Amino acid sequence: MQMSSNDRQVRQRRVFHIPGYDPIHPRRYRELYRTESALQAQISGYDIAIRAQPTDESFNWAVDARIDGAAVATQIDVMVWSDIVRQSMAQSIPATYWQLAKTTWIYLRTGTLRRLMMMRKGPVIAALYPVGMLLLQLFFALWLGWFLGSLLQSGILAGLGAVGWTEGLVFSVVAGIGQLLKYAIFGGVTYVLLQWFKSKDNKLFAYYLMHDYAFSAQNRGANPAALEARMKEFADKIAGALQSDVDEVLVVGHSSGAHLAISIIADLIRDGRVPTEGPKLAFLSLGQVVPMVSFLPKARRLRGDLAFLATQDSLPWIDVTAPGDGCCFALCDPVAVSGVTPPGKIWPLVMSAAFTQSLSPPRWKALRWRFFRLHFQYLCAFDQPKDYDYFQITAGPVLLADRYKDRPQSKSRIDIAVSKYTSILP
């Protein structure tokens, strides 16, 4: 995108990336940015390079880019909460199945699951996947354990019959041992198989997704205390950047990181920590799953923050999703569907990354069924880019507000009130 004569050129930018529920070290995001930015630069014809910036306070890297003839220096910080994620995932197998029961009951009993399905089936199917997969694993492990245990017991009884021991003390003792072995085999096989399934979760993602949904639902939409404390730390870092001499401070919330960003930015504005003079604060939400939380009964803080941000004319909020991403609520206006649309609503601008158009047919074919990879496509290169380019947004010379100032709302957006729960914090 070329700048107009009225646009303010960005020479320095701070980007704060808030990941979703991800236990992986933030180094992953730096490496993803390094490889994908180089690929996008080659496709789109600009120069971009990154360099690590070791620090004890945060995980960040520097980006030097020349786009449309303008040199831009950017620092990208990953807001780390992977330790909280890992702690929440440190559950035994029985505890995970208890989580499954509790989380499913919460979404069913509150009516949230039914209302989520009224918008997009994809993310609801993704939410039901770990339930189905974990139950399938459990039933298969129980069946195989019972089958092998019963097979051994039947073999012992058949052996006794073959030697003519069908009654008496010896028969009773050996038959009793066979019964014990049956249950021992049943328990042992079930345990070993469930452990094996868990060891393969880096490919199946059943435990990971179950922990993700359980984390959001454990307090019925309210943030856990540890997460609230970490969000305050994130707010302090962003507030510090707003006092620096950069041109733009861009907050990026990906997946469930989007609803954290919404509350963090709302707190910053309410607390008067966003100066009227100085860097421009902007918000980019990517692949958001806000309704998974905002539709729950105790998500009053989040719903209030959604309504508050929707009217902030000084804060550009661009919400980018794609129908091809089955793990997000594509083109669902998070404010409207949560039932908290305020008078004078301005934001967010809901737009599509249009995977089926911005990826070439061979590339789309290769990625189409890789659902979790597609959920990260917003942070990756497009081989047929349209008007969404993550690297120009984060490292280019155009402010987010100027980049999309003439962009209309997506015609396919869903902007009707769906949530059963609409109460907010006073």
Image (cartoon, rainbow, N blue to C red):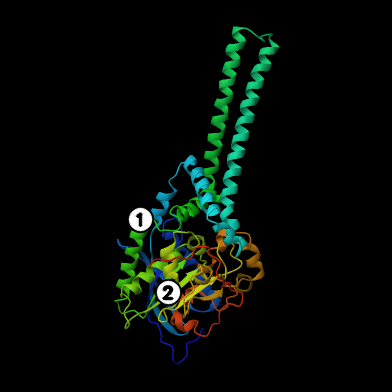
Is 178 above or below relative to 418? Answer: above
Q: Is residue 214 visible?
A: yes
SS type, badge 2: helix
Residue pointed to by mark 2: 309
What kind of residue is marked 1?
Answer: Ala
Decide: marks 2, 1 in contact (CB < 8 A)?
A: no
Across and down, in percent, residue 379 comes to: 50, 68
State the mark number for residue 408: none
Across and down, in percent, residue 35 comes to: 49, 66
Left or right of residue 239, residue 203 in this image: right
Q: Nearer the viewer, mark 2 or mark 1?
A: 2
Q: Residue at x 37, y 66 (%)?
A: 60
Across and down, in percent, residue 206 comes to: 55, 49
Left or right of residue 82, residue 417 in this image: right
Is 312 above or below relative to 89? Answer: below
Looking at the rendered structure, the number of numbered marks drawn on it comes to: 2
State the mark number for residue 226: 1
